[in-house]
Amino acid sequence: MTLSRRQLLAAAPAAFPLTSNLLPHRRGQGQGQGQGAPARPAATPKTRFAANIEMWWGNLPLLDRIRKAHELGFPAIEFWPWRGKDLAAIAALTKELGMAVAQFTAWGFSPGLNQQQNHARFVAEIEASCAAAKQLDCKLMTVVGGNDVKGMTQAAMHEQIIAGLALAAPIAERENVMLILEPMNVRVDHKGHCLYGSEAAVRICRAVASPMVKINWDLYHCHISEGDLCGHLHDGFDQLGYVQVADHPGRTEPGTGEIHYPRVLRELHALGYRGFVGVECNPSQPEAEAAKGLWFADQW
């Protein structure tokens, strides 16, 4: 008997059921939301996740966010600018809880590193930020390239980023604090930013040629900008300094979108990465539930 296309499609779900065993990174399919994750799901066996305490528990005081991260099993935290924060209190609490400060932002979007007129200020801020890093026992600091400058080509802006990083590299080397340059995406989150995709960031860091100037490889941004996450990681791994994750669309926790994080994290592990992985995402549900996505992302 010959079946029509419609009959074949109708029979397909029964013949080939899509169970949670076939899709282990997607929570809530067949087994219930997050079933099987432990009480401290961020204490994962292979990947060391760092909670971004700017985006997680945003309604709580900062120190309470750190305590919440510890309760869920995160071994580390990360945050954005250090200025305006009680660094002594953060250092004391993370030490008490046995947690690390994985990284923070030393230089943001504005003024732009992509303009020579800002380089002296950039160098001074890197000096100050290294002192903050020492206080926090932190080894990594994010720097941002800057938004488009009217009248400058992208190539010219990237040359200025190289020049600025080259000026600050001796400070980073002296203080043993790595500067990690973060490429963004311009399609969804940062329209008008001058640096997006890993390939340009790899070229910039190779041009600077410092062991203490590498990339903050945000996989969410790179997925949107260029795709082929594992391929690009392989090509530019010599310039990788740190990794961040979020799913797409929505910039929510792993397991909620289209990125198959078990595969990507497995590739990172195979390449030899053993550093922290920052969870810079907007939880789509209460944090205790969202963290279960990290547990399932670590299963491979």
Image (cartoon, grey):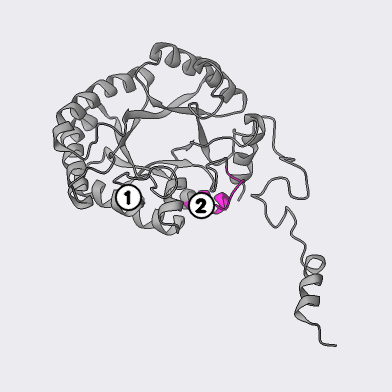
Q: Is residue 300 above or below residue 55?
A: below
The magenta stretch is 254-267
Q: Amino acid at mark 1?
A: Asp
- As for residue 113 lying within the magenta part, the answer is no
In which quarter of the view is residue 136 placed?
top left
Label annotation for residue 264 = 2
Could you tell me which secondary element the residue under label 2 belongs to? helix
Which residue is under mark 1?
238
Q: Where residue 93 appears, x then y in whole percent?
A: 49, 14
Q: Which residue is drawn at the image coordinates 20% and 52% (left, top)?
A: 155
Label annotation for residue 294 = none
Between 214 and 149, the one nearer to me in the picture: 149
Around disc 1, counting alpha carbons within 10 Å, would you say few (fewer than 14), some (14 to 19), or many (20 or more)?
A: some
Nearer-N-terminus badge (2/1)? 1
In which quarter of the view is residue 9 placed?
bottom right
Q: Is residue 162 left or right of residue 4?
A: left
Between 5 and 73, the one nearer to me in the picture: 5
